Amino acid sequence: MSIEHKLYLKKLKKEKVFIISIQILITLLFLLIWEVLSKYNIINSFIFSSPSKIINTIYNLYLERILFISIWVTVKEILISFILGSLIGFVLAVIFYMVPILKKIFDPFLTLINSLPKVSLGPLLIIWLGANTSSIIVMSLLINTIVTLISIYNGLINTDSYKIKLFQTFKATKLQTLIYLVIPHNKETILSSLKLNISMSLIGVIMGEFLVSKAGIGYLILYGTQVFNLNLVMSGIILIMIISFIIYEFINFLEKKK
């Protein structure tokens, strides 16, 4: 390794440490300002809560053995809907790429489903599937699958045309071109769609838990709203943010390892 390359890597490392340090500093500063404003009643602590009250609420949930049960219920639903949504979206994107006429046939239907407010389907899902986990997962799939499908499909059809022609020159079939060129060429697009899918899965699961769940973080938020326990509501929101961040960073880790 040359001296220039070592210096370049050292510079990148310093830049990364600087960015993380600034991010931590901004977070701590925000929490400190929030705590001070709440403590001295500059903002209404009943409505906006405070970091100390949120920490105390989360600790109480832990003591009552509710915290990890709620986290597990929500994480399980997110992972199931994320995996199913990613697989279904990927398979449909590949099918539409291989058979373009199918995309033209189903395009208006996909647009209609994608533009439909999913929460309006909640009552129907409860009637069809019952007030259970199935309704929550289907609600999430309605949100994340089409987004994943569109994202991956757009990546597949925008593969470098010159490379595709090169494969065709060597008599490669469309399936061979797909497996050995198109999919590997779109690894970044697929991983980016997974990041988006995480957000969509989280939104879908929380929406579903608002409607039918008797456990999970969404249920804690809904219950907190009903009894005007806004500390519980804010705690639920913070927990959702933490879960989303952890899963997102895990996908980032996989992306770097590709």
Image (cartoon, grey):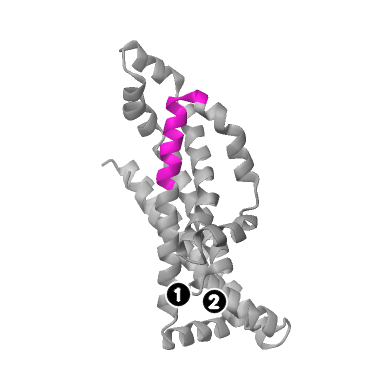
Classify 10 Å Cα crowding around label 1: few (below 14), some (14-19), many (20 and above): many
Viewer-proximal residue, 74 or 128?
128
Of callouts 2 and 1, the N-terminal one = 1
Kindly identify the amino acid type of the residue bearing the numbered disc 1.
Answer: Ser
Viewer-proximal residue, 129 or 89?
129
Image spot of residue 255 (x, y percent): 38, 47
Image spot of residue 166 (x, y percent): 36, 15
Kindly identify the amino acid type of the residue bearing the numbered disc 2.
Answer: Leu
Q: Is residue 215 magenta?
A: no
Residue 208 shown left or right of residue 163 in the figure: right
For the residues labelled 2 and 1, say whether their Cβ atoms are less than 8 Å apart: yes
For the stretch drawn in magenta, the main secondary structure is helix
Residue 170 shown left or right of residue 95 in the figure: left
Specify the quadrant of the image occupied by residue 77: bottom left
Residue at 39% across, 28% down? 182
Q: CA distance from mark 2 to mark 1?
A: 8 Å
Specify the quadrant of the image occupied by residue 235: bottom right
Viewer-proximal residue, 119 or 185?
119
Residue 20, above or below 217: above
Q: Quadrant of the N terminus?
A: top left
Q: Which residues are magenta?
A: 86-101
Image spot of residue 152 (x, y percent): 47, 37
Residue 177 visible here: yes
Residue 49 visible here: no
Residue at 57% across, 62% down? 207
The residue identified by callout 2 is: 220
Residue at 48% across, 66% down? 132
The residue identified by callout 1 is: 70
Q: Quadrant of the C terminus?
A: top left
Element marked by disc 2: helix
